[in-house]
Amino acid sequence: VAMAGLSAEMQGGAAAEYLYETSAQVLSLHPSSGSVGGGSRVTILGRFFRDEGMQCRFSGVASAAQDVVTYLSEGAVICVAPEAASVGAATVEVSINEGAD
């Protein structure tokens, strides 16, 4: 089987690894509200957090920079809420693979 778009060196039988991991789960957060201007530090409690590659999203919008996620433990991180487009509820998600999921 030939793979289109790969150089001859990449097609030559070398294997690459893909790692399956348990997705992070958000169980609760505090505080549960903040300014639409963003900047609120939000403690997120959950499961399967890790100290590398963390990203927080508020209604699909990632925190402004990778360094705004502070890893505390496998069950707690602190994220800085980004600016919101409008007043209202936001879903909060945590990614363990730099937002690829």
Image (cartoon, rainbow, N blue to C red):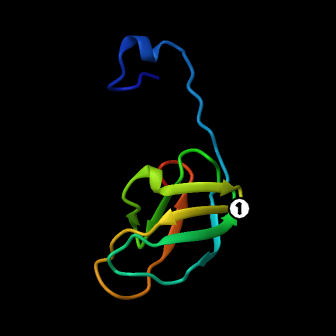
Relative to 7, 95 lies left or right: right
Asked if residue 54 can be seen in this view, the reply is yes
Q: Residue at point 57% right, 63% down?
A: 78
Is any atom of residue 99 visible in this view? no
Q: Is 53 placed left or right of 37 in the picture?
A: right
Relative image position of residue 29 (x, y in whole percent): 60, 76
Say which residue appears at 37% left-offset and 68% top-offset: 82
Q: Which residue is mark 1?
A: 75
In the image, residue 19 sits, relative to residue 65, either above or below, namely above
Q: Would you identify the image quadrant in which residue 37 lies?
A: bottom left
Question: Residue lying farthest bottom?
Answer: 88
Q: Is residue 32 above or below residue 18?
A: below
In percent of width and height, residue 1 lies at 47, 23
**Residue 27: quarter of image:** bottom right
Tell me which amino acid carries mark 1.
Gly
Residue 38 to residue 70: above or below: below
Q: Position of residue 4 (x, y in %)?
A: 34, 26
- Against 35, is 74 above or below? above
Q: Residue at x 39, y 88 (%)?
A: 88
Name of the residue lying farthest toward the left: 85
Q: Secondary structure at mark 1?
A: loop
Pointer 1 local density, CA inside 10 Å: few below 14, some 14–19, many at least 20: some
Q: Residue at x 36, y 22 (%)?
A: 6
**Which residue is at the front of the view, 95 or 34?**
34
